[in-house]
Amino acid sequence: MEVTGFFTAIIIGLIVGALGRLVVPGKQNIPIWLTLAIGVVAALLGTFLAAAIGVDDTPGVDWIELALQVGLAAAGVALVAGMRARR
């Protein structure tokens, strides 16, 4: 991954984190910076998962990869919000 790819992944991750938070129903009592950090991690994991199953390089917008990233972000937000609510 090149430097420009890394910065692009961070920007996409911030957007994916916000989308993941929107997908999860209800109120999440986690700070926005944590949501965005989850989004960056989910974007990176989603990219690696898409490469593993062979859907990372499609013509146009990679909708399957984006769906994987948003799904992972939503799962991460729900998991972290659930863990913080139990404390």
Image: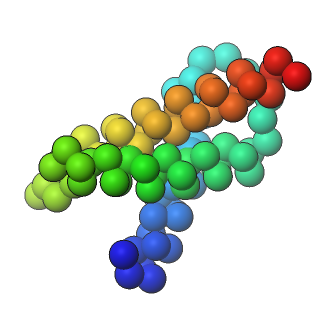
Q: Is residue 7 above or below residue 26?
A: below
Residue plotted at (54% across, 52% down) = 41
Q: Extreme left residue here?
A: 59
Left-right relation of 40 to 87: left
| Point 49% across, 47% down: residue | 42
Image quadrant assignment for residue 25: top right
Can residue 20 be seen from the camera position used here?
no
Query: Is residue 2 positioned above or below 33 on the image?
Result: below
Q: Position of residue 68 (x, y in %)?
A: 35, 39
* Left or right of residue 72: residue 33: right
Q: Quadrant of residue 57?
A: bottom left
* Residue at x 61% of width, y 46% of height: 38
Q: Among all residues in the image, which is located at the extreme right? A: 87
Q: In the image shown, does 83 or 7 lie closer to the viewer?
A: 83
- 62 left or right of 48 in image: left
Residue 61 lies, in percent from the top left, at 23, 53
**Number of numbered discs visible in the structure rendering:** 0
| In the image, residue 32 above or below residue 59 | above
Q: Quadrant of the N terminus?
A: bottom left
- Give residue 79's position: percent from left, percent from top: 63, 27
